Image: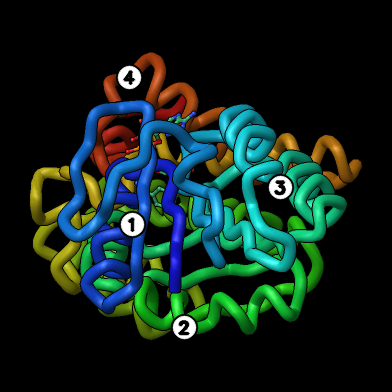
Amino acid sequence: MKIGFIGLGNMGGPMAANLARAGHEVTGFDTAEVSIEGVTMADDAHQAAEGREVVITMLPNGGILRSVAEAIIPAMTKGAVLLDCSTVDVASARAVAEMANEAGLLALDAPVSGGVGGATNGSLTFMVGGDEDGFEKAGALFDIMGQKAVHCGPSGNGQAAKICNNMILGATMIVTCEAFALADKLGLSREAMFDVVSTSSGYSWSMNTYCPAPGVGPQSPADNDYLPGFAAELMLKDLRLSQQAAEDANADTPLGQAATDLYAQFVENEGGTGRDFSAMLPRFEKRKRG
Ligand code: NAD
């Protein structure tokens, strides 16, 4: 397939490289000077999108996505697929899809989970909203870049699935860290706490797979001095998107809001930037009540 790829950063770079390695003809564009193995660089976004069957975007936020979409939609051929894999607000995803549909294009919002590791080894999970036809057309590409793609319904629903998932993840990680810090103060060993909770009703991905306590449970960023992994500032971005969506949809999300406030405090005032989001545990360890 002829593919355009716009936004070749930490995630987009390895995703584009995997598509090229699988034999697709990939033309890329990024505002930063980058070079990706197997990818031909275009002079601008318009050129990267022109005549392509699928154009993939992997950009920092909804504002940038909207401006890139305005530049590339007129360049794209009717029937082509605009596949946005960035994590952006639901409203921007829906606005871009509407613009693309009006121009006779198929549009998909397909944010990912799996991080830079998943992007590099082609094991991302895609949560996809938008046209069924587009989902089928892009199927072979999801198979190369990831291990699973779930069609979640109409445009915006991929982003909705992603932020709901990450709101659960953020709140669950916080309460798991709180519980470890409480257990410490009650004289309960972390090993015993893990053995009980990981096989009891408090279990979760945060506890069982990504345990925030070093030396306990499977290997996780806690065992690597809390180097990310999934950085606290990226969790904060997703939590803020969840609260923006909750505001727009008039949904009551008190724990999502509390998790957002706590990650904001951690990232902005407590040195959390550049640390894994599970570094909430050493944060709680040092604190007292009140
Ligand atoms: P990044 O900052 O490394 O990459 C973004 C790239 O977009 C950069 O190379 C930047 O130069 C480029 N860019 C910015 N404006 C542009 C424009 N107008 N035209 C062309 N290129 C432009 O970020 P990333 O970590 O690759 O993340 C990309 C997206 O994936 C974000 O939405 C992020 O939330 C999401 N995401 C990231 C992770 C992760 O672990 N890094 C995990 C899941 C989802």
Look at discs 3 and 4 and give the one toward the viewer: 3
Whether 154 is drawn above or below 282: the answer is: below
The residues tagged by marks 3 and 4 sit, at their Cα atoms, a distance apart of: 32 Å
Residue at disc 1, secondary structure = helix
Q: Secondary structure at mark 3?
A: helix
Disc ID at residue 93: 3
Name the residue rendered at 45%, 22% in the picture. 265
Nearer-N-terminus badge (3/4): 3
**Mark with earlier residue (1, 3):** 3
Distance between the alpha carbons at the discs numbered 1 and 3: 20 Å
Looking at marks 4 and 1 on the same chain, the residue that comes earlier in the sequence is marked by 1
Tell me the tag on residue 140.
Answer: 2
Q: Disc 4, disc 1: CB below 8 Å?
A: no
Label 2 sits on what residue type?
A: Ala
Disc 3 or 2, which lies upstream in sequence? Answer: 3
Q: Amino acid at mark 4?
A: Glu
> Which amino acid lies under the numbered mark 1 shown in the image of this protein?
Gly
Q: Are marks 2 and 1 in contact (CB under 8 Å)?
A: no
Q: Quadrant of the N terminus?
A: bottom left
Can residue 287 be seen here? yes
Counting from the top left corner in percent of width and height, residue 90 is at: 73, 46
Sequence-earlier tag: 2 or 1: 1
Residue 188 visible: no
- The one nearer the camera, 196 or 267, is 267
Query: Badge 4 is on which residue?
Result: 270
